[in-house]
Image (spheres, helix red, strand yellow):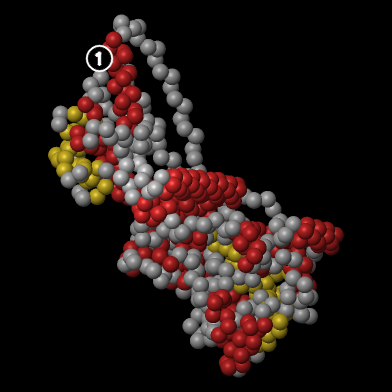
Amino acid sequence: MDTDTDDEGTRIKAAAELHKRQASRPSEPPEPPARVARAPRPQPAPPPPPPLASVSARSAAVAAPAGARAAPRRPAGAITMRQLIASGFLEPGVQVVYVEYKGATTHGDLTEAGHIKCNGLTFESPSAFSIYIKRLVNPTRKADDGWKAVKYAGKLLEHYKDEYLRNKYAAALAESVSGAGAGTGTGTGTGTGEGAAGVRAGGVGTGAGAAGVRAGGAGAGAGTGAGAAGVRAGGAGTGAGAAGETDAYYGRTYWNNLAQVRDHINTIATGDPTHEWYHHLKEWRGKPFQRALIFNCGNGWVERVLWQEKIIVSGLGLDLLEPFVREAQSEANKLGANLTYVKHDINSDDLPPGPFDLIVNVAAAHHISRIDKVFNSLRQRLEPGGLFVSWDYVGPHRNQYPENQWRMMSMVNTKLLPAELPQDMRYPHMPNMLADDPSEAVHSELFNNTLRRYLDVVWWRSVGGAIAYPLITHNDNFFSKRTVDDATLQRYVAMLLEMDYAWTQKTGATLFAYVIASPKQDVDLRQVAGALTREDAREARAHANGGVYYRPTSVAWRLHMHAQVGRARARDATARGVLAACTVAAVMIIVAVVCLRRGGRCCGSVDRRRFEALAF
């Protein structure tokens, strides 16, 4: 089996010394059999780079005497040349692998067992082969990483290893999805076919066993990025988009800016890739709502779409920011829509008096701190038979992703995406979030439980987004700075969506959800009173603590400590540099002064003018 680290040469040298010592010893009784190693514990993420590769007894010109100990075995899970051959990435042959070093190219034969033969020697790993070749030219060479030095068909072996990993993990996750009972089927094209709704890794359409969800079925739900819920800002081609003062808010790129992503999440949420959530709501209701309330409405695109689609007869929009209120009212007036907008702080102001037969939340509730107060109020404002509809972020508080999710998305970003698409992975920094927008995802993690305290859920579709959303959203490599062709982009977006769906199925974790709920008729008033009291205490503690509600996650703490160590090292390096510079300057000045006092002659034939230039 083949694994590599940078101290391959150290192992070779140690093996040679061990062989010499054993050769000089008298014969020894055979050693007891080695203990059977325990199977490694399963890891939530791909195994880390494995330890040293073992070197063949004949590699690197080190001949082991008879009876010498075998080189240490490598751990299970390491990627080997044999695996790459079995997977079809490499083909055995004569002179098919080679090393280019200092202007010379040396070829080797690749065997069926994944070994490399050259100059009568057999090498069990790429590193053993590359260090042998390089030591022929440079005997002082200490170590080498063969995966980054040995080439096959013009590409480094590392390229084939990465391709193998991409296929391996994408296939494994796709298999876990197809076995999750989410309504798989045989579909083709863009998601048509009975039971087919997902996309298979490596292609745009769906296939047999893909992560499908039956139309209107019981699979996971779908969701969108904050501020861009379901359709592009401005509404689904209505021409009433954002403009003026609010462009900065709606100008950012989210995962659902990609049509492929919208089709995916629409299929999960509504059962039809062409149906947005409001299309589903229209069919669900069967008749228009008479009076709708939309809180944190932004520029008003949601209400305009609902009015134009004849889903609502009239609507009242609330928002904290005056520019949004002005723009929303202006756009509604241009359409002649029966829509009214008022400035309103949903955390402190009481909701307008009802009754309403529809209350809508689109990417807004995750900004609410007094979430119990608001949900209790909206329950009271809904008339019997009224509906609350939500399409929002329901993931971790302030985007503080847990350890397993962060590791998985980091692995996908570095191992499975090509060099043209990776995201600049930055864990959301709590001090920056508190400074920029302390309301962002302030209690998103409480949405589910709080909603069910006051409302009966009649439709819930978990969006997912744990993998695909962070890697696509605000990633210019998928948008303005894209360098890959359309087919390549679609292939990797399909892979991300497939893995994202698999993650939601396996862990139950989701970042977004599409929900329809109706008001409870039998609310426990004592439970409500207790929840409101606890909320008051929670908000008071957070206010006293600078807006912080919880302790840092393990990821945030670890990254913080790494940053602290890095800054300390930078300060130490700067201090050492300044001290060294001051020391050198002081010595130069002293030498110059001494030489000047001696009449400009010092240290041989150095003249006075040169010392003056040196010192001053």
Q: The residue under label 1 is which amino acid type?
A: Ala
Which quadrant holds residue 104?
A: top left
Q: Is residue 567 positioned above or below 327 on the image?
A: above
**Percent from the top left, x then y, of residue 392?**
60, 67
**Percent from the top left, x then y, of residue 105?**
16, 43
Q: Is residue 577 positioned above or below 232 on the image?
A: above
- SS for tag 1? loop
**Percent from the top left, x then y, of residue 604?**
32, 42
**Residue at x-position 30% and y-position 6%:** 27
Check the image and name the residue furthest to the front.
599
**Residue at x-position 61% and y-position 70%:** 363
The C terminus appears in which quarter of the rendering? bottom left
Q: Nearer the viewer, residue 180 or 508?
A: 508
Residue indicated by mark 1 = 66
The N terminus appears in which quarter of the rendering? top left
**Residue at x-position 70% and y-position 67%:** 368
Which quadrant holds residue 533?
A: bottom right
Q: Is there any visible trace of residue 252 in the rendered image? A: yes
529 vs 150, left or right, is: right
**Residue at x-position 20% and y-position 44%:** 102
**Percent from the top left, x then y, of residue 108?**
17, 38
